[in-house]
Amino acid sequence: MSEKYPVDEKVVNVNEKNLDRYDSPAPSDRWIPPEEWLERLIADYSGQHGGNSETLPPGTDPNRMAVSVLTFSEEESVKILEAFVIDHSDDYSIDRAFLARGAELAKGHTACDMEEGEWAYLTCKTAGLINNWSPYAEVRAVTVPYDDPDEPCESFRAYLIGMFWVCVATAVNTFFSPRQPGISIPGGLIQLFCVPMGRGLAYILPDWGFTIWGTRYTLNPGPWSAKEQLLATIISQADTIGNFTGLLDMRLPAFFGQRWVGYGFCIMLAFANQIYGLGAAGILRRLSVYPQQAVWPAVLPTLALNRTLIYSDNKREVINGWKMTRYICFALFTVIFILYYWLPNELFEAIRLFNWMTWIAPKNFNLAVITGSYGGMGYNPWSSFDPNTSGSSTMNSPFFAQLQQYVMRAISGIVIIIMYYSNTSWGSYMPINSNTAFANTGVAYNVSQVLTPDNKVNIDAYKTYGPPYYSVSNLYVTGACYVYYTFSIVYVFIRYWRPLRKAFVGIVLNTWHRRSIYTGFEDGQTRMMRKYKEVPEWWYSLVFLFGFIISIVSVVAWPTQTPWWSICVVTGVGALLTIPWVIIESIAATGISTGTIWQVLPGIIWPGNPMAQLVILMLGGAFEDMAGSFTQDLKYAHYAKLPPRAVWRGHITSCFINCIVYCGILELMVVYFNQDSTLCEWNNKQHMVCSYANSVYSSTISFGAFGTNNMFKLYPVLPWCFLIGAVLGLFWVLSEKWVPRIRDVCKARMEGERFAWFDHYIWKPAATTMACLHPAIALSGAQSWSGNTNLTYGTLGIYLAWVFQYYLKRRYTAWWGKYAYMIFAGLNVGVAISGLIVTLVFSFGAGKNASLNWWGNSVLTAGVDYELYNNEVALQAIPEVGYFGLSPDQFPLNW
């Protein structure tokens, strides 16, 4: 290797061959690429760009990149490509063109019709990208194929900044979350503020420190680094309050009014809420973090912004005529969306939920039902001009996933419309798309009419008032959730049996033989992580055990009306759903919404006990949320080469701080805002109406007091949805195995010309479509209804996804890799800044109660669409008898 391209000793094992397939040669025996290959690879990634070339992430050293990628000879590269084609043949996230290219190169230069030297370069380059970097262009756009283990990461200033923002964000978000409108500090804004704070500390802190075992620890290790920035960001993101809102429901007289709910109980339940899922996330690392196929697309925008904020671009680079740096692009689009936010949200509100089709005939009920953006179904070809309403998360999920979800969402909407107009389960007497529970007179269900002072059901009052009824969209979504739970469990556990077995057998064998937790994972990203000390399995086991124990203590030591063994139910069901959750989330950034299952199960086990319902809802919902959150943090660390123990310590510490601050703020809030005993009521003078707490309370009463058994008797099809999902999942798995054999049968029975036509025009298009269809991802789109969430909130997003995640990504790869993430980072940060300004000015400041009254701000609410949104109209009038649904003698009484 020449002096210009020296072997990079800081690249941890970057030239180490795949230990499963090759013997690792001594450094002096390593294959050395021709110098012209290195220069060509550098040129491919810098300078002038066009077409489907790629660009380097900011701060990348082109020489180190080239040395890190070109490490395999032609023979080794062919073996890598052959293994790549096999390993990723059923990978939903892989670029099919890239996979086909790899398969073509593996066949040799003759089969590719290429000159041998050109073939050799492309083969070695492609194999190096796959094995030393990543087979996914979106991952290569935000990571580098080498690591500098000396770069500061777990520093005093990273902890100081991260913990500062945990305290500030938790305090602000908790204090103002009950307010309408509320105030919150978004994560993107915190990530932005971390940069000047970090650089400021790097400037003012002295270099005071000490050395232990050859390692120096100092207050100021030098310039603020990308690893410190990301660690501070990870720490700061533990500001979530999750289902803690349920503590308000337990404590306040407006809800359950339990006076024993003090700081001690709150802090115990908060710890259980936050810590419990972290242990599960660590145990599932082999399944959800280390495999290459676990892309976790939702983490990539944050990584892109992180590097952009710290590193500078190659200013000589030109991509399709664009010379703008990433930072300038981010700043420009931040300003654009700061200004643009005001147009659809304040100045011309009609274009935010653009229900223009209803303007034709505002009082036309059917038109409002089908096309309405508020209370209708949102079938509108252009339903919004506000990307924040529909499309801000476009870069968080691959196009194939977004398309499948949108198509299933549209199909589900058609089914709901058919159910509505056929009056399925009395749905025509209620609005089509509402998550409100209704009485049999068509008004919102008033639970106080059937409750005793201790929140039990008054049977006599219930026999008069009746059970709660649900809109067809709410009913459909509930059934779809039940189908999805069992489908995803059956499908994922069978379809992903091999990686599941590898993960769990690896836990046992590696622990027993005291082997590295990375054993069995030999891709470039994992090999670079071998430099850092791993987090032992028993660390996560202790965290899991701690969460389990304090959960039991929380429900037993206080009068929660919840037996200790309920925690075993939470653990079992939570673990069963967490596994498919993290697998689906790692592929498509769409997890399994578990809120419904934690409503159903307690309602079956403890019918008529809303307190137990609420406790299990808080603990169960947090289990998956925290497991997913921490798994995402571990993937951040894996991509950015943060020491695993640093992330573990940072996240655990921030969770404890978050819990302490939250419970303290909760006490302060109850004292400050409840002086007149109106906190969480509509007439609170500070507008602390607690909309989410009211929603949780309503749900708890509906399922806890009324009971799931009664709901199933009222809607007998719902329990069958669990069986339908399991059978459908088994059928789909079997069809994936047996349907391909149909082609062989047709080939044997058809004439040659007829089979050729069938194969070309029917089989291949169908096979190509089905190869990209992930049923668990698609099925999740069926749940995107009810609560006035309709197709409006996805239509603009699918257009943007096609442009950015499909067209630009394939046709202008370098441009996409450099600018796409920055555009959407600017969108999210710009919207966050303007949203805070609007809230502060128009809710607290000089513009309080001010509004701009003109046609563009009133036309959208002038018709039936908005009346549907407010539950004021329905398709059919209440029958002459005075009610719809079951007669009083048929009311379910299964307590």
Image (cartoon, rainbow, N blue to C red):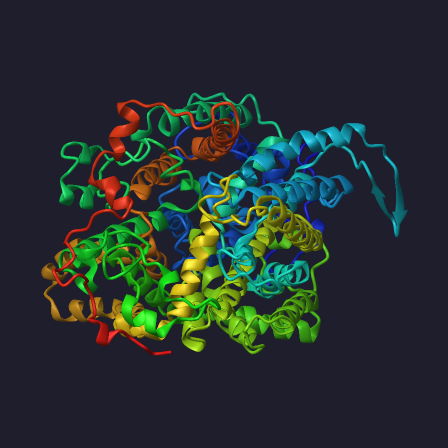
Quadrant housing the N terminus: top right
Q: Nearer the viewer, residue 660 or 309?
A: 660
Q: Nearer the viewer, residue 127 or 421?
A: 421
Instruction: Please report the residue visible at 45 percent of the width from the left and 66 percent of the height from the top.
Output: 598
**Relative to 312, is 766 on the left or the right?**
left
x%, y% of residue 317?
A: 52, 24
**Relative to 203, is 667 on the left or the right?**
left
Q: Quadrant of residue 396?
A: top left
Is residue 722 among what the camera can see?
Answer: no
Instruction: Please report the residue visible at 29 percent of the width from the left and 70 percent of the height from the top.
Output: 718
x%, y% of residue 657?
A: 69, 51
Instruction: Please report the residue visible at 45 percent of the width from the left and 57 percent of the height from the top.
Output: 696
**Relative to 210, is 34 on the left or the right?**
left
Q: Nearer the viewer, residue 609 or 449?
A: 449
Q: Quadrant of residue 542?
A: bottom right
Would you place residue 552 above or below residue 847 in this image?
below
